Structures are given as C-alpha cells and as structure tokens.
Image (cartoon, coloured by chain):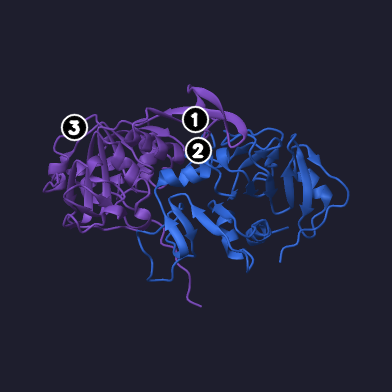
Amino acid sequence: MLDKNAIAKRIAREVKDGMYVNLGIGIPTLVANYIPKGINVELQSENGILGMGPFPFEGEEDPDLINAGKQTVTLLPGSSIFDSAMSFGMIRAQKVDLTILGAMEVSENGDIANWKIPGKMVKGMGGAMDLVASAKNIIVAMQHVNKAGESKLLPKCSLPITGLRCIKRIVTELAVVDVLPQGGFKLIERAPGVSVEEIIKATAGKLLVEGDIPEMVID
Amino acid sequence: MINKTVKSAEEAIKDLHDGMTIALGGFGLCGIPENCIAALVKKGVKNLTCISNNAGVDDFGLGLLLQGKQIKKMISSYVGENAEFERQMLSGELIVDLIPQGTLATRLMAAGYGMPAIFTPAGVGTEVAEGKEVRRFKYNGVEKDYLMEYAFEPDFAIVKAWKGDAAGNLVFRLTARNFSPLVAMSGKITVAEVEQMVEPGELQADQIHVPGIYVHRIFQGQKYEKRIEQRTVRKKM
C-alpha cells in the first residue's frame, strides 16, 4: 500500500518533458517534489503563474506571490504572470497538457465528484470545474476507499458532479486504474504487495483485469 | 490627460449606496483593496451584492463587511476560510452563489470587452448548469456542450494596484494581479487604490496592465497590511 508521497512519486512518472502541468491541492502538490531530473516542465497555478517554483525560504515570503492554494511560492527563471481570465483561457484552450487533482469519487465513465458533500459546509469549486471541463489529460490522485471503507471508484457518482466523462487515469494507494473510452475501469498496475483480489474488492465499479498485472515502479 | 485622482477612499465611494452590486479584485487576501474595504465598513452601506473570488477571513478582507452584516449576497468560487461567513450562510442571512473560477473571471472580462455573454464548458452536467442555456459547438476538433454565462454588470468595481497614475493607468505586482484587471474593466464606476501614485509618464505606456479608460477614480492607499493567508516556507538545506 502506498502513502501519499508514494502516490505522488508514481504520478510524477506520468509527467513528460515539455509539459505544462496544473497541480491541485493535496497529494497533487507533492508531485512537484518528485518530477525526475532532466525533465523540464512548467507548473501552472490558476491564479496566474506559469513556471511556479518551490516554497520560499523563511524570511523570503512575498505577500504578492502566492499559488492557487494561497500558499507563498517562488518563481523560476522563464516564469510569467497573467490575470485570471488568461489563466483559465489557456486551460480552456487546452494549452495546459496535464492536470492532476484530488477527488471524492470517480465513476466508471470518467465522471468526477470533488467539490461538495450535501449537508456539509460547501466551500466552492474554485477552478476545479473549469479544469475538468477542458483539460485533455486528467489524472486523479486519491485514496481507493473513503474513511467509511466504501469504494471511491463507482459505477456512478453519488455526490454532486464536478465534471462529466473527463478522467483518464486514477492513482490510489492500491493501484493505477484507467477509465476506458467506452466506459469501465481497467487495472493497469498494483501497488507493491497488494493483490489483484484486494483491488477488485475495493473497486465498486466494473473493473477489467487482463493478464498479469505488474507492480508499480515507484523510484 | 484626464485627471482621475480623488483624495481618499471615502471620496472614491461617496456615491456607493445600499443595495448596490460591487466587484472586488484579489485572490484570497492577495491584492485586495484594503483601504476601500475599510471605507465601506466605516460608511456602513448595507445589502451589498459582492462579486469576489473569495470572501476574506474573519477579521480581514471581505470578512470585515460580513461582520457588519453589510453583504446580502456573495458571488464567489471559493469561500472556505471564514467562520462568520459559514454561520451567515447556514442561517440563511447570506445568499451565496458559487460559480467556477474561470467563469467568474471571464464574466468580468466580458463586461470590459463589451460582450453580453460567453460560452464555457465549465459546469456542464453539474448543478451550475441548472436553468442555463446549453449550446453545442465544435472547437479544437471536438464537439461538446457549452453553458451560456452572462457578463457581470457591477455598479462599482474596486481594485488595488501596485502603481498607478492620475490618468488611471494601472500596473499590478506579481500574483496580486489575479482578478483585478478584469474587475477593473467591469465597473460602471471603477475605483482603483494604489500602493504608489506615480507621475504621468513614469509608467511605460507599453507595460500598463489596465489602461486608464477603465478607471474612473484613483487614489493612493494610506497603508497596506498585505496579510499572508498561508505562509508556507521550506528549510534552508
């Protein structure tokens, strides 16, 4: 079973040279720490940064320089800053190659729910609906089951939808799972020490298992 | 040159009345018009509809207007950090309209570009789409559904810029830019407070983020706290 950092490490292997990448809050933010050396990417933050760098050293924080999670950040050489309309313009126009975000539920046709739980304080969707509606490649980083032990990979989302038929790949503590274009999940890799049976048990949606399922390569 | 200078925040919002709709720049607490918010608190205007990406924190930003129960309706994309906001929303005192962040930005932009409506895929198939017109377009080789969203038409637009001049030209610093240029474009009356008023000609004409035609009143803010919401640092190795 993978911890949050190992999930981030596995997702970092999906990041290819030359990509513009938008990272959501939570596990996706950790992906930035594991992008392999020699791979040049630019991180986009939807409040208006391309070429976002790491957190600043203590004493070097600038209140005018934050990411979309409102955290203080830095800029890397070659970075640029723009307004929110242009930021979502480049997202809508699919200039951003890869979006990595968290989710509460994903359905077997690629629908995602990640912004609202009925009965709980609703904080808002932020940029999530814009991102999932437009991004050409979206990877979800999440736990396979929720705190109650129920699968988050479902035949149909039970929570309010953020976007329809948009998720291509899911990386959890148990597995890498793809969403097939015709619908249904497909098991791609399993976490070290996790059996195919355990993954089937933790997946409520239809899961295609074909042949031998390799273990994930993390490092 | 047309001189847009006013003396103070109080003068800039002198005809901002109860029940008006105002758009405000800023992302979280970054780039918010601190002086105008203070003046709105002092003036005590009520029943405001506020268009702003966020709603501040309990004791800063738009949270100050919430404390005085001056806001009737918030139109935002994310409102997570504010206990008084939550209380007013759950008790029904405050109407909250949550909309996607890109939709918010583009509806403001549309106002300044003279476009009554825009089409966006954000929110298709979600509760955001309820009651909205859906049109199908082919774009980038793919046919899909788009929601029609209307331009905002706020009575007042209020922003903070880093530098500005008497002509109303504005330059923003780093990510304090965020929604502010779009907000500035959207107002029937646009008020800009700036950290530094400079002499006309000091700002390079080709480096200006918002041309003065969009700005009706400009003044130098008295002071800026520039509070950091999520101070996040790394250790020196």
Residue found at x 61% / y 30%: B143
Which residue is disc 2 drawn over? A120
User: Is residue B105 shown left or right of residue A101?
Assistant: left
Residue B14 in the image: x percent, y percent? 13, 38
Q: Nearer the viewer, residue A112 or B66?
A: A112
User: Is residue B141 shown left or right of residue A207?
Assistant: left
Disc ID at residue B128: 1
Tell me the distance, in whole angstroms, between the alpha carbons under discs 1 and 2. 18 Å
- Disc 3 vs disc 2: Cβ atoms closer than 8 Å? no
Which type of secondary structure does the marked residue at label 1 adopt? helix
Residue found at x 22% / y 33%: B46
Residue found at x 45% / y 47%: A87
Q: From the image, state whether disc 3 or disc 2 is nearer to you.
A: 3
The colour chain A appears in is blue
Which type of secondary structure does the marked residue at label 3 adopt? loop
Output the letter for the chain in purple.
B
Query: Residue flagged by tag 3: what amino acid is it?
Result: His
- Disc 3 vs disc 1: Cβ atoms closer than 8 Å? no
Which residue is disc 3 drawn over? B17
Disc ID at residue A123: none
- Asked if badges 1 and 2 are on one and the same chain, I answer no
Query: Residue flagged by tag 2: what amino acid is it?
Result: Lys
Residue A129 in the image: x percent, y percent? 53, 39
Query: Residue flagged by tag 1: what amino acid is it?
Result: Val
Residue A8 in the image: x percent, y percent? 63, 58
